Amino acid sequence: MLHDPNRVYVFDTTLRDGEQVPGCQLTTPEKIEIAHELEALGVDIIEAGFPISSPGDFQSVVEISKAVKIPTICALTRANKGDIDAAVEALQYAKHPRIHTGIGSSDMHIKNKFNSTREEILERAVEAVKYAKKSVEDIEFYAEDAGRADIHYLAQMIEAVIAAGATVVNIPDTNGYCLPDQYGDKIKFLKENVKNIDKAIISVHCHNDLGLATANSIAGLQNGARQIEGTINGIGERAGNTSIEEVVMVLKTHQVLGLHTHINTKNFYELSRMVSTQMRMPVQPNKAIVGSNAFAHSSGIHQDGFLKNRENYEIIRPEDVGFPNASIVLTARSGRHALKFHLERLGYNLGKEELGETYHRFLTLADNKLDINDDDLLLLMTGDNMYIQSLLKR
Ligand code: KIV
Ligand code: ZN
């Protein structure tokens, strides 16, 4: 089968990078449940854990490998034999195993983390890939802190690990440092200057310290990367990882980019809620794509425009991401059009004058109550003003 050059592979690390967040630890059965949902979502790779890190993580990789059939199952290691041996063992039941090994690539990490030299680190990187390749065919190499690495050294490292057998090369912006054009240029440089780059897929792995993870991932894809790494809800250490749902919906919305994934986007909302509940990590209401307000229209101007034609204020259809539906929220900033819409839904068809009078009473109510629900509207229509008066007395 011919490789589709516009296909973007989706690598989910909710269960590894996401699960590193304090308080978000999951049990093995919880991880299996999420892994099944990731499979249904259509991700291509599930990073199931870091087997050497704890017996629990090791067991989770074993059990996810047994439970999941279609996606590749990936295990993280550092660039040493002990980590790689543990990953190989944990992946023994995986239908499609991948080892994700790597080492720091910035001078900051080389000096201050490894107390080493560029030459020594390069050697360790190559040795790790060669060693892992003896047991597993699919090897992904990560050049940690690539966002701050010297580009010529990074290119040298990437060329060497591909020659050693890496099938995917991950260029992490570990600290969420880069600007989108800087990150995009990095990927472009590697694409144009690494001799054997056509033998591997370039992967983007961006952190969100400056709120740029999605923008940086897209810049990487625009410049030749074809795998994106991220988590559901953007969960992850510090400010988190790239949100998979955001990147996928950017590609779907901007078809001009010519890139596509195999993700079933209708599964996003439910999976987002599952991850949030199991990891005890609420989703902020204004979170793009999956936040509770992502499809809620509340100001009068927007509501009026939305009710005339939803595309005036809706670039993504909520049903495309499995969101229950768009909502017209009633607040003191709502207009007559929104009130009319909700009253008609409840069976009240008011003439212009009656609507004007009801709207006046509605505003009094809305100024005194944060959100107006159907019960409030019914009382507004039947309550003889008693309800409003009682609120005003508070
Ligand atoms: O952010 C990072 O650099 C990582 C690597 C371990 C892939 O998570
Ligand atoms: Zn990371």
Image (tube, rainbow, N blue to C red):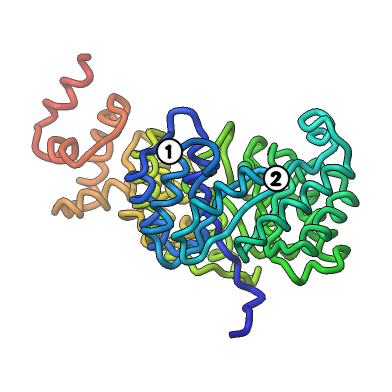
User: Where is residue 81 shown, x and y percent of the image?
Assistant: 66, 46
Q: Residue at x 61, y 61 (%)?
A: 135
- Amino acid identity at mark 2: Ala
Residue 167 falls left or right of residue 245: right
Location of residue 84 with respect to 2 vertically, above or below: above
Location of residue 35 with respect to 56 vertically, above or below: below
Residue 98 seen from this side: yes
- Amino acid identity at mark 1: Gly
User: Where is residue 387 shown, x and y percent of the image?
Assistant: 14, 27
* Residue 103, image quadrant: top right
Identify which residue, 205 or 69, lies in the foreground. Answer: 69
User: Where is residue 226 shown, x and y percent of the image?
Assistant: 66, 65
Which of the image's four quarters has the C terminus?
top left
Residue 135 falls left or right of residue 33: right
Location of residue 299 with respect to 309 vertically, above or below: above
Look at the numbered disc 1 and give the secondary structure of its residue.
helix
Residues at badges 2 and 1 in contact (C-beta under 8 Å)?
no
* Residue 382, image quadrant: top left
Identify which residue, 209 or 139, lies in the foreground. Answer: 139
Q: Which callout, 2 or 1, points at the residue further toward the start of the chain?
A: 1
Residue at mark 2: 79
Ligand 1 is found in the corner quadrant, namely top right
Residue at mark 1: 56
Residue ranking furthest to the top: 394
Q: CA distance from mark 2 to mark 1?
A: 21 Å
Residue 58 falls left or right of residue 259: left
Number of labels in the image equals 2
